[in-house]
Amino acid sequence: MINFNGKLQSSTSLFLNHENRGLRYGDALFETLRVVNSKVFFWEEHYLRLMASMRILRMEIPMAFTMEYLEKEILKTIEANALGNKAVRVRLSVYREPGGLYLPESRGVEYIVETKPLESPFYTLNAEEYGVELFKDHWVNSGLLSTLKTSSRLVNILAGIYAEENGYDNTLLLNEKKNVIEAINGNVFLVKGNTIKTPPVNDGCINGILRKQLTKIISKLEGYALEEASISPFELQKADELFITNVITGIRPVTRYRKKQFHTEVSRDLLGKLNLQVRLGG
Protein backbone atom coordinates (compact mmCIF):
# COMPACT_ATOMS: atom_id res chain seq x y z
CA MET A 1 0.00 0.00 0.00
CA ILE A 2 1.07 3.57 -0.66
CA ASN A 3 -0.29 6.86 0.66
CA PHE A 4 -1.35 9.32 -2.06
CA ASN A 5 -2.47 12.65 -0.59
CA GLY A 6 -3.71 10.92 2.57
CA LYS A 7 -5.55 8.09 0.80
CA LEU A 8 -4.21 4.53 0.99
CA GLN A 9 -3.99 2.82 -2.38
CA SER A 10 -2.55 -0.37 -3.80
CA SER A 11 1.04 0.04 -4.94
CA THR A 12 -0.07 -1.24 -8.36
CA SER A 13 -2.83 1.34 -8.78
CA LEU A 14 -2.56 3.94 -11.56
CA PHE A 15 -2.88 7.27 -9.75
CA LEU A 16 -0.40 9.48 -11.65
CA ASN A 17 -0.75 10.74 -15.20
CA HIS A 18 1.45 12.19 -17.91
CA GLU A 19 1.04 15.73 -16.53
CA ASN A 20 2.85 14.96 -13.27
CA ARG A 21 5.42 17.75 -12.87
CA GLY A 22 7.91 15.50 -11.12
CA LEU A 23 7.90 13.30 -14.23
CA ARG A 24 7.92 16.19 -16.70
CA TYR A 25 10.34 18.63 -15.11
CA GLY A 26 11.80 17.09 -11.96
CA ASP A 27 9.62 19.59 -10.06
CA ALA A 28 9.66 17.51 -6.88
CA LEU A 29 11.40 16.94 -3.56
CA PHE A 30 11.78 13.84 -1.45
CA GLU A 31 12.88 12.75 2.01
CA THR A 32 14.21 9.26 2.72
CA LEU A 33 13.37 8.28 6.29
CA ARG A 34 14.39 5.48 8.60
CA VAL A 35 11.57 4.32 10.91
CA VAL A 36 11.99 1.66 13.60
CA ASN A 37 9.10 0.39 15.72
CA SER A 38 7.01 3.34 14.50
CA LYS A 39 9.65 5.87 15.57
CA VAL A 40 10.83 8.18 12.79
CA PHE A 41 14.57 8.80 13.20
CA PHE A 42 15.50 12.51 13.20
CA TRP A 43 11.97 13.46 12.17
CA GLU A 44 12.22 17.11 13.20
CA GLU A 45 15.38 17.58 11.11
CA HIS A 46 13.76 15.90 8.09
CA TYR A 47 10.63 18.01 8.44
CA LEU A 48 12.51 21.28 8.75
CA ARG A 49 14.67 20.45 5.74
CA LEU A 50 11.58 19.61 3.69
CA MET A 51 9.84 22.85 4.65
CA ALA A 52 12.96 24.92 3.88
CA SER A 53 13.36 23.17 0.51
CA MET A 54 9.72 23.78 -0.41
CA ARG A 55 10.14 27.48 0.32
CA ILE A 56 13.29 27.65 -1.81
CA LEU A 57 11.41 26.01 -4.72
CA ARG A 58 8.47 28.41 -4.23
CA MET A 59 6.06 25.58 -3.43
CA GLU A 60 2.96 26.51 -1.50
CA ILE A 61 3.04 24.77 1.87
CA PRO A 62 -0.46 23.55 2.83
CA MET A 63 -1.71 24.58 6.25
CA ALA A 64 -2.18 20.88 7.02
CA PHE A 65 1.53 20.13 6.49
CA THR A 66 2.42 20.16 10.18
CA MET A 67 4.99 17.82 11.71
CA GLU A 68 2.16 15.96 13.44
CA TYR A 69 0.08 15.52 10.29
CA LEU A 70 2.88 14.20 8.09
CA GLU A 71 4.16 11.90 10.82
CA LYS A 72 0.63 10.51 11.25
CA GLU A 73 0.38 9.86 7.49
CA ILE A 74 3.78 8.14 7.49
CA LEU A 75 2.82 5.87 10.39
CA LYS A 76 -0.60 5.18 8.85
CA THR A 77 1.12 3.92 5.71
CA ILE A 78 3.52 1.77 7.73
CA GLU A 79 0.63 0.20 9.65
CA ALA A 80 -1.29 -0.45 6.42
CA ASN A 81 1.70 -2.52 5.25
CA ALA A 82 1.92 -4.42 8.57
CA LEU A 83 5.35 -2.95 9.34
CA GLY A 84 4.58 -1.21 12.63
CA ASN A 85 7.08 -3.23 14.64
CA LYS A 86 9.73 -3.42 11.94
CA ALA A 87 12.60 -1.34 10.60
CA VAL A 88 11.28 0.53 7.57
CA ARG A 89 12.61 2.70 4.78
CA VAL A 90 10.12 5.44 3.91
CA ARG A 91 10.16 7.76 0.93
CA LEU A 92 8.08 10.92 1.27
CA SER A 93 7.78 12.64 -2.12
CA VAL A 94 6.31 16.11 -2.57
CA TYR A 95 5.70 17.55 -6.03
CA ARG A 96 3.89 20.52 -7.50
CA GLU A 97 0.32 20.02 -8.71
CA PRO A 98 -0.06 19.18 -12.44
CA GLY A 99 -0.47 21.93 -14.99
CA GLY A 100 1.59 24.43 -16.90
CA LEU A 101 4.82 24.25 -18.81
CA TYR A 102 8.01 25.58 -17.21
CA LEU A 103 5.76 28.11 -15.49
CA PRO A 104 3.44 26.09 -13.23
CA GLU A 105 -0.27 26.84 -13.19
CA SER A 106 -0.36 26.20 -9.44
CA ARG A 107 2.06 26.48 -6.55
CA GLY A 108 0.10 23.83 -4.61
CA VAL A 109 1.54 20.37 -3.92
CA GLU A 110 0.64 16.71 -3.70
CA TYR A 111 2.54 13.95 -1.89
CA ILE A 112 3.22 10.23 -1.84
CA VAL A 113 4.40 8.02 1.04
CA GLU A 114 6.07 4.69 0.16
CA THR A 115 7.47 2.03 2.50
CA LYS A 116 9.96 -0.83 2.25
CA PRO A 117 11.19 -3.12 5.07
CA LEU A 118 14.80 -2.95 6.25
CA GLU A 119 16.86 -5.83 7.61
CA SER A 120 18.14 -4.38 10.89
CA PRO A 121 16.68 -1.96 13.44
CA PHE A 122 20.22 -0.82 14.32
CA TYR A 123 22.97 0.80 12.32
CA THR A 124 25.55 -1.90 11.65
CA LEU A 125 29.02 -1.62 10.18
CA ASN A 126 29.60 -3.43 6.91
CA ALA A 127 33.37 -3.79 6.65
CA GLU A 128 33.35 -5.90 3.49
CA GLU A 129 35.45 -4.77 0.52
CA TYR A 130 33.98 -1.53 -0.84
CA GLY A 131 35.77 0.25 -3.65
CA VAL A 132 35.12 3.70 -5.08
CA GLU A 133 36.35 5.80 -7.97
CA LEU A 134 35.91 9.40 -9.09
CA PHE A 135 33.09 10.12 -11.53
CA LYS A 136 34.47 12.63 -14.02
CA ASP A 137 31.96 12.53 -16.88
CA HIS A 138 29.71 15.17 -15.31
CA TRP A 139 29.91 17.36 -12.23
CA VAL A 140 27.51 18.88 -9.72
CA ASN A 141 27.35 22.65 -9.74
CA SER A 142 28.00 24.15 -6.33
CA GLY A 143 25.13 26.29 -5.12
CA LEU A 144 21.90 26.18 -3.15
CA LEU A 145 19.84 24.00 -5.52
CA SER A 146 22.42 21.19 -5.43
CA THR A 147 21.99 20.91 -1.65
CA LEU A 148 18.27 20.06 -1.98
CA LYS A 149 16.88 16.53 -2.33
CA THR A 150 15.08 17.10 -5.61
CA SER A 151 13.94 14.33 -7.95
CA SER A 152 16.39 15.58 -10.59
CA ARG A 153 19.32 13.19 -9.97
CA LEU A 154 20.77 12.58 -13.44
CA VAL A 155 24.39 12.90 -12.31
CA ASN A 156 23.79 10.32 -9.56
CA ILE A 157 22.09 7.97 -12.02
CA LEU A 158 24.90 8.18 -14.57
CA ALA A 159 27.47 7.78 -11.79
CA GLY A 160 25.69 4.61 -10.65
CA ILE A 161 25.73 3.19 -14.17
CA TYR A 162 29.43 4.07 -14.48
CA ALA A 163 30.17 2.30 -11.19
CA GLU A 164 28.32 -0.85 -12.25
CA GLU A 165 29.94 -0.95 -15.68
CA ASN A 166 33.43 -0.59 -14.22
CA GLY A 167 33.17 -2.84 -11.15
CA TYR A 168 33.05 -0.18 -8.42
CA ASP A 169 30.71 -0.20 -5.44
CA ASN A 170 30.22 3.56 -5.52
CA THR A 171 31.62 6.69 -7.08
CA LEU A 172 32.58 10.09 -5.72
CA LEU A 173 30.98 13.13 -7.34
CA LEU A 174 32.88 16.32 -8.13
CA ASN A 175 31.78 19.95 -8.41
CA GLU A 176 32.83 22.39 -11.14
CA LYS A 177 35.98 23.20 -9.12
CA LYS A 178 36.92 19.50 -9.25
CA ASN A 179 36.52 19.06 -5.50
CA VAL A 180 35.00 15.88 -4.05
CA ILE A 181 31.55 16.71 -2.67
CA GLU A 182 29.70 13.44 -2.00
CA ALA A 183 29.06 9.85 -3.09
CA ILE A 184 26.14 8.69 -5.21
CA ASN A 185 24.00 8.01 -2.16
CA GLY A 186 25.45 9.95 0.75
CA ASN A 187 27.81 12.48 2.23
CA VAL A 188 31.55 11.86 2.46
CA PHE A 189 33.87 12.07 5.47
CA LEU A 190 37.66 11.80 5.24
CA VAL A 191 39.90 10.94 8.22
CA LYS A 192 43.55 11.95 8.48
CA GLY A 193 45.11 11.47 11.90
CA ASN A 194 42.63 12.83 14.43
CA THR A 195 41.04 15.25 11.93
CA ILE A 196 37.72 14.32 10.35
CA LYS A 197 36.94 16.38 7.28
CA THR A 198 33.73 16.75 5.29
CA PRO A 199 32.91 19.10 2.39
CA PRO A 200 30.93 22.25 3.26
CA VAL A 201 27.36 22.45 1.98
CA ASN A 202 28.23 25.43 -0.23
CA ASP A 203 30.49 23.11 -2.27
CA GLY A 204 27.27 21.53 -3.59
CA CYS A 205 26.79 18.44 -1.42
CA ILE A 206 23.37 17.38 -0.16
CA ASN A 207 22.53 18.94 3.19
CA GLY A 208 22.35 15.48 4.71
CA ILE A 209 20.49 14.67 7.91
CA LEU A 210 23.02 12.10 9.09
CA ARG A 211 25.83 14.44 8.08
CA LYS A 212 24.34 16.95 10.51
CA GLN A 213 24.03 14.36 13.28
CA LEU A 214 27.62 13.19 12.87
CA THR A 215 29.06 16.70 12.83
CA LYS A 216 27.28 17.30 16.15
CA ILE A 217 28.69 14.11 17.61
CA ILE A 218 32.24 14.71 16.37
CA SER A 219 32.30 18.32 17.57
CA LYS A 220 31.68 17.12 21.14
CA LEU A 221 34.41 14.47 21.15
CA GLU A 222 37.80 15.37 22.62
CA GLY A 223 39.75 12.90 20.50
CA TYR A 224 38.76 14.33 17.12
CA ALA A 225 38.91 17.65 15.31
CA LEU A 226 36.12 18.39 12.83
CA GLU A 227 36.84 20.38 9.69
CA GLU A 228 34.27 21.44 7.10
CA ALA A 229 36.41 22.26 4.08
CA SER A 230 36.77 21.39 0.42
CA ILE A 231 38.33 18.01 -0.34
CA SER A 232 40.71 17.66 -3.26
CA PRO A 233 40.94 14.28 -5.02
CA PHE A 234 44.65 14.29 -4.14
CA GLU A 235 43.75 14.09 -0.43
CA LEU A 236 42.08 10.71 -0.92
CA GLN A 237 45.43 8.97 -1.43
CA LYS A 238 46.77 10.40 1.84
CA ALA A 239 43.72 9.72 4.01
CA ASP A 240 43.60 7.06 6.73
CA GLU A 241 39.87 6.46 6.37
CA LEU A 242 37.00 7.40 4.10
CA PHE A 243 33.34 6.74 4.80
CA ILE A 244 29.91 7.53 3.37
CA THR A 245 26.84 8.44 5.42
CA ASN A 246 23.07 8.45 4.97
CA VAL A 247 20.09 7.86 7.26
CA ILE A 248 19.38 4.36 5.91
CA THR A 249 22.79 2.67 6.18
CA GLY A 250 24.33 4.97 8.80
CA ILE A 251 28.08 4.82 8.16
CA ARG A 252 29.53 2.86 5.24
CA PRO A 253 33.34 2.58 5.31
CA VAL A 254 35.20 2.74 2.02
CA THR A 255 37.99 0.16 1.98
CA ARG A 256 39.66 0.95 -1.34
CA TYR A 257 40.28 3.85 -3.70
CA ARG A 258 42.53 2.83 -6.58
CA LYS A 259 45.60 1.31 -4.86
CA LYS A 260 44.86 2.97 -1.52
CA GLN A 261 43.51 0.75 1.28
CA PHE A 262 41.64 2.42 4.15
CA HIS A 263 41.19 1.53 7.83
CA THR A 264 37.80 1.42 9.59
CA GLU A 265 38.61 2.18 13.25
CA VAL A 266 37.09 5.68 13.33
CA SER A 267 34.01 4.48 11.45
CA ARG A 268 33.44 1.81 14.09
CA ASP A 269 33.89 4.27 16.93
CA LEU A 270 31.48 6.80 15.45
CA LEU A 271 28.90 4.16 14.59
CA GLY A 272 28.71 3.10 18.23
CA LYS A 273 28.18 6.70 19.30
CA LEU A 274 25.55 7.19 16.59
CA ASN A 275 23.57 4.15 17.76
CA LEU A 276 23.78 5.42 21.33
CA GLN A 277 22.38 8.78 20.28
CA VAL A 278 19.52 7.11 18.42
CA ARG A 279 18.64 4.98 21.46
CA LEU A 280 18.66 8.07 23.65
CA GLY A 281 16.29 9.82 21.28
CA GLY A 282 18.72 12.04 19.31
Image (tube, rainbow, N blue to C red):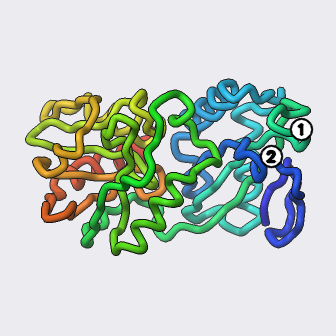
Q: Position of residue 218 (x, y in %)?
A: 26, 35
Q: Amino acid at mark 2?
A: Arg
Secondary structure category for the residue under label 2: helix
Disc 2 to disc 1: CB gap under 8 Å: yes
Is any atom of residue 279 visible in this view? Answer: no
**Label 1 belongs to which residue?**
100
Badge 2: how crowded within 10 Å, few (<14), some, or many (20+)?
many
Badge 1: how crowded within 10 Å, few (<14), some, or many (20+)?
few
Q: Residue at x 27, y 58 (%)?
A: 253
Quarter of the picture holding the N terminus = bottom right
The mark nearer the N terminus, 2 or 1, is: 2
**Label 2 belongs to which residue?**
21
The residue nearer to you, when weighing 83 against 7, is 7
- Say which mark, if any, is on residue 250: none
Q: Position of residue 64 (x, y in %)?
A: 83, 32
Q: Amino acid at mark 1?
A: Gly
**In the picture provided, is 159 more to the left or to the right than 261?**
right
